[in-house]
């Protein structure tokens, strides 16, 4: 079932199954709540107006390029594109006033499916190409599926993700446990830009079996399979499946009020950060005539 609430600044759609309810607003197609068997599993603000000032990207869909692009520039087909920086000299999550400030168009496709769409003009924050992009939310049983799509009229880079935070248990997420199906992670410099070196998942980065999180992370793990990760938070287990090549694991170190540091963790399916400057990595390049498709499924138990 899908219900629509137009009483706030942004329209809200609640997509329900017998086991869960997922609330999404039209600002950046943001997930504001996931209610699973009576338990709130995703972080969300009390009011939709609070999403206007959201430096932690809580619940938002980010793009055109999720994560960081070093030096806020890249070269594509022999041409250098200078992007608008918004984190020092680098660009984060598509730049300032990107998709996270946009109202998306919503369309109810069926009784458990809602699609949110946005148009990104050529030159937006320095990216080439006019783009049409969308994310479709489907709720089936205890599974939330996101399908990302995109098309362009000029060669560009495209790498969206969802920035939902989870914490069904409450308290610090460092007390929860995580398993990540990855054998390597991306080494980064002091500005969190990849150095180009893939490090083995050893020591504190070895999540090959379920272990307590225990310390802060803001790192990209290179996935070994579509079964990306499983988190245990009290009596709730959350698993992520995706066909994207990597996942950023962020333990909310710098989350502000009302959540606080380590008040939630994000598991963001993605291309590698700074991939436009690393042609040896999986390519985020999208060209005219192609259609970008990827998915992420969050399964609750």
Image (cartoon, rainbow, N blue to C red):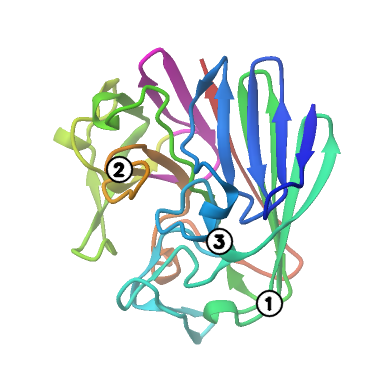
Residue that protrudes farthest toward the front in the picture:
7
**What main secondary structure does the magenta stretch of the protein show?**
strand
Front-most of residues 183 and 97: 97
Residue at 31%, 78% (x, y): give it.
89
Is residue 228 inside the magenta stretch? yes
Bounds of the magenta span?
225-248
Residue at 34%, 36% (x, y): give it.
182
Q: State how far apart marks 1 and 3 are (Cα).
A: 15 Å
| Quadrant showing the N terminus | top right
Residue that protrudes farthest toward the left in the picture:
203
Residue at 36%, 16% (x, y): give it.
234
Front-most of residues 14 and 231: 14
Residue 20 location (% of width, % of height): 63, 21
Within 10 angstroms of label 2, few (less than 14), some, or many (20 or more) residues? some
Q: Earlier in the sequence, mark 1 or mark 3?
A: 3
Residue 65 location (% of width, % of height): 51, 63
Classify 225 as above or below 79: above
Classify 244 as above or below 85: above
Q: Say which quarter of the image contains residue 129.
A: bottom right
Q: Earlier in the sequence, mark 2 or mark 3?
A: 3
Residue with the mark numbered 3: 100
201 sits to left or right of 71? left
Helix, strand or loop at label 1? It is: loop
Q: Are marks 1 and 2 in contact (CB under 8 Å)?
A: no
Is residue 69 inside the magenta stretch? no
Between tags 2 and 3, which lies in front?
2
Front-most of residues 7 and 289: 7
**Label number found at residue 260:** 2
Residue 271 location (% of width, % of height): 47, 54
């Amino acid at each position: 079932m899908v219900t629509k609430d137009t009483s706030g600044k942004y329209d809200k759609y609640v997509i329900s199954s017998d086991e869960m309810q997922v609330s999404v607003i039209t600002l950046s197609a943001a997930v504001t709540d996931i209610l699973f068997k009576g338990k709130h599993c995703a972080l969300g603000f009390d009011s939709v107006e609070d999403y206007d000032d959201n430096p932690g990207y809580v619940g938002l869909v980010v793009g055109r390029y999720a994560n960081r692009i070093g030096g806020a520039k890249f070269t594509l087909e022999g041409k250098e594109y200078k992007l608008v920086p918004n984190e020092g000299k680098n660009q984060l999550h598509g730049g300032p006033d990107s998709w996270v400030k946009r109202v998306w168009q919503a369309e109810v496709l069926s009784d458990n499916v809602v699609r949110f769409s946005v148009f990104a003009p050529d030159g937006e924050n320095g990216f080439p190409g006019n783009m049409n992009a969308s994310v479709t939310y489907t709720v089936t049983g205890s599974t939330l599926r996101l399908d990302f799509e995109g098309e362009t009229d000029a060669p560009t880079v495209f790498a969206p993700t969802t920035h939902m935070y989870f914490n069904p248990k409450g308290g610090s997420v460092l007390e929860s446990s995580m398993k990540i199906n990855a054998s390597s992670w991306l080494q980064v410099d002091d500005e969190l830009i990849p150095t180009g070196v893939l490090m083995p998942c050893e020591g504190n980065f070895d999540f090959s079996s379920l272990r307590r999180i225990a310390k802060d992370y803001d790192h990209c793990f290179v996935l070994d399979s579509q079964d990306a990760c499983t988190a245990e938070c009290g009596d709730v287990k959350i698993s992520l499946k995706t066909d994207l090549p990597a996942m950023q694991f962020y333990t909310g170190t710098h989350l502000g009020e009302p959540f606080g540091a380590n008040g939630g963790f994000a598991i963001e399916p993605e291309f590698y950060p700074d991939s436009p400057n690393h042609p040896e990595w999986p390519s985020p390049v999208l060209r005219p005539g192609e259609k970008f498709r990827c998915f992420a499924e969050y399964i609750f138990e």
